[in-house]
Image (tube, rainbow, N blue to C red):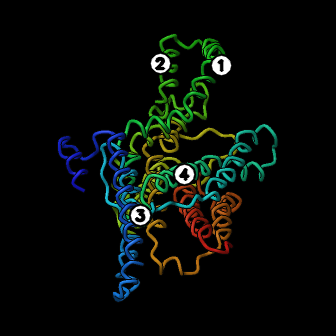
Amino acid sequence: ALELVRLHAPTKEPGFRSTEAMASVMTKVAARTSTAAEEAAAEEPVAAAAGEPRASAEGSPNERARKEALEGDGQQKALIAIGDGQQQKPAELAKPPTRKPRIDAVDGCRFALVFPIVIAHFARFGTKNPTLLRLLTQENVLVGGFFVISGYVSGYTSTKLGERAAEEKKLAKPELFFWQRVMAYYPLHFLVSTIFAPMFIWVERMYSTQWSTTAFRAFLNYTLLQAWFPKEAEIWNQPTWFLSALTFSNLMMPTMVLPRVASLSKQGLRKLFYGLTAVSLLQKVSYSETSHFHSRALLAQPMYPLLWNLTRFHPFWALMEMTMGIAAARDIMLDTAEDKAMVHTNPLLWFAAAYGSLALRLTRFDFNDAIVRGVLFVPLWTKFLTSIHRDALVERPK
C-alpha cells in the first residue's frame, strides 16, 4: 500500500504514472501475498505438533492468508480495470449497465406505411375506379405515421430506461448527433439529385423558367430547405420534402426536445402528447375552415394549394409529430412494475382502428386528409406503437 501511495503521489493526477510501473507494483503485491500464504501453511502443522489448540476455520493463519491472497487478487483486477488517467471504485466496476432490449417489431411497422404510400403515388395511373382511388390515395394521412415512428425510435435510443434523463453520451455533442442522422440519407439524396439534375433543369427550361429561379430551387434541393417554402416544397424530386422536414426535426432533437421530454414524468408526458395533438388539430381545422372539411374531389386540385402545402409539408408540424412519438416512447420506458403487470390491449386492435380510419372516405364522414391524420390516424397509430412495444416485452406476446 505504501508503494502504491509513493507511486501515485508525485503525479498529482487521478491515474497511474505508467502502465509499466503499475504492473511492477502489482507483481510485488502478488509475490508478497503468495509468500505470506506459504509461510502460514508451513506454520500450521508446527503449531499442531507443539500441542497448541487448533484455530477455527475462519481464524486459522492459513485461512487468513488465503483470504488475503484472494483480496489482493481482487484489488489487482480492479486496479488493472481502472487504466491510466481514471480511478473508479470496485463497486462501480461491478455494477452491470442497464441495457435496453431491441424492439424489432417497431422497425417492422415501417413497411405497413411504406407499401400503401408507394401504391398511393401510382394508383392514379393504374385505375379509374372511384372507390379504389378514394381508399388508395391517402398518402398525406399515412406519412404522419413516419414522423411518429422516427420520434419514437429517437426517444427510445437516446434516453435512459426507467429514469427521467437523457443519454448524456449520445447528446453530449449535438452536432455529432445531428450529422450522424442526416448522413444516413443525405449522400443518397445528393447522388440522385446530381444524376438527375440535367433532367430537372431541362424540364424547367421547357416551361421557360428563369435561370435565377432554377438556381434557387437547386439551392433549396441540395440544402434540404424546400419544405419551408410552400410554393417550392415539391421541386425536383418531390418526395424529398420529407427529408427537408426530417432534417429540421433532427436539428432540434439533441438540444431542444430530447433532454426536456426525457425529464418529464408519465403524467407530464401524457399532458404533452394531448397538448401537441390539440395544437396540431387547431392548425388543420384552420385550413379546413378556409377550404373544405370534407375530402376534395378525386384528381382535383386543392382550393388553396399553398395553404395545403403549408399544412402537410411544413417542418414545424413534422417536429410536433416526432415529439409526440418521443413522449409515447418515454411513457413506456417509465413503466413501473404495476404498469408492466397490467393486461394490455392486443396491438392488432389498434392497428385495425388506425387503418380503419382511412375507410371514412367511403362514408358521409369523408373528412379531408388533414383532419383524419390529426384527429384519428396519428393518435391511433401511436397507441399501436406503444401497445406493440409492451407486447414485445412480455414472455408470451399476443
Q: Nearer the viewer, residue 365 or 19?
A: 19
| Displayed quadrant of residue 282 | bottom left
Q: Earlier in the sequence, mark 1 or mark 2?
A: 1
Q: Earlier in the sequence, mark 2 or mark 4?
A: 2
Q: Earlier in the sequence, mark 1 or mark 4?
A: 1
Q: Residue at x 41, y 46 (%)?
A: 170
Residues at marks 4 and 3, CA–CA distance in whole angstroms = 50 Å
Q: Amino acid at mark 1?
A: Phe
Q: At which x and y percent is residue 8?
A: 22, 46
Q: Amino acid at mark 4?
A: Ala
- Tell me if mark 2 has few (under 14), some (14-19) or many (20+) residues whose alpha carbon lies within 10 angstroms of its own: few
Q: Amino acid at mark 2?
A: Phe
Q: At which x and y percent is residue 72?
A: 36, 62
Q: Nearer the viewer, residue 93 or 193?
A: 93
Up-down relation of residue 374 to residue 200 (above or below): below
* Of the two numbered discs 4 and 3 in the rendering, the one whose residue sits closer to the viewer: 3
Mark 2 near mark 4, Cβ–Cβ under 8 Å? no
Mark 2 near mark 3, Cβ–Cβ under 8 Å? no
Q: At which x and y percent is residue 211?
A: 51, 10
* Of the two numbered discs 1 and 3 in the rendering, the one whose residue sits closer to the viewer: 3
Mark 1 near mark 4, Cβ–Cβ under 8 Å? no
Judging by the rendered image, the residue that carries numbered circle 3 is 95
| Displayed quadrant of residue 1 | bottom left
Judging by the rendered image, the residue that carries numbered circle 2 is 216
Q: Nearer the viewer, residue 197 or 347?
A: 347
Residues at marks 2 and 4, CA–CA distance in whole angstroms = 29 Å
